[in-house]
Image (cartoon, helix red, strand yellow):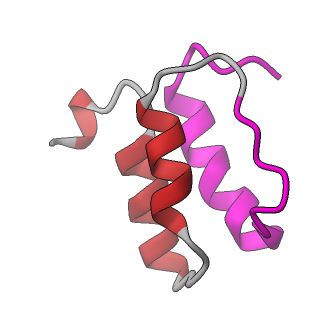
Amino acid sequence: MDLDDDATGALAFQTKCKQLGLKFPVQSIVTKLTLDVEVLKLNHCGLGDKGIEALAECIKINSRIQM
């Protein structure tokens, strides 16, 4: 998948996580993103500051996620 075809923002999130060297369970969040939901339940994900930074990349792309 190309970043231009990444409507859910999952690839952007994964890419940013890799750039930041994040080690938490990225795949569980990517799975939630690919479900194309409006609400992400991220309780107990342990994102931290860098994880939030990566999630921000996703939110820039995904127009369905409401804040």
Provide residue 46's location: percent of width, then percent of height: 79, 70
The residue positioned 72% from the left and 23% from the top of the image is: 39
Provide residue 12's location: percent of width, then percent of height: 41, 49
Tag count: 0
The residue positioned 81% from the left and 70% from the top of the image is: 49
User: Is residue 45 part of the magenta span, yes or no?
Assistant: yes
Magenta-colored span: 40-67
Q: Nearer the viewer, residue 52 or 60?
A: 52
The residue positioned 56% from the left and 52% from the top of the image is: 29
- Where 48 sits versus 52, above or below? below
Quadrant assignment for the C terminus? top right
- Where 35 sits versus 30, above or below? above
In the image, is 33 to the left or to the right of 39? Answer: left
Q: Nearer the viewer, residue 58 or 39?
A: 39
Q: Quadrant of residue 1?
A: top left
- Where 19 sits versus 26, above or below? below
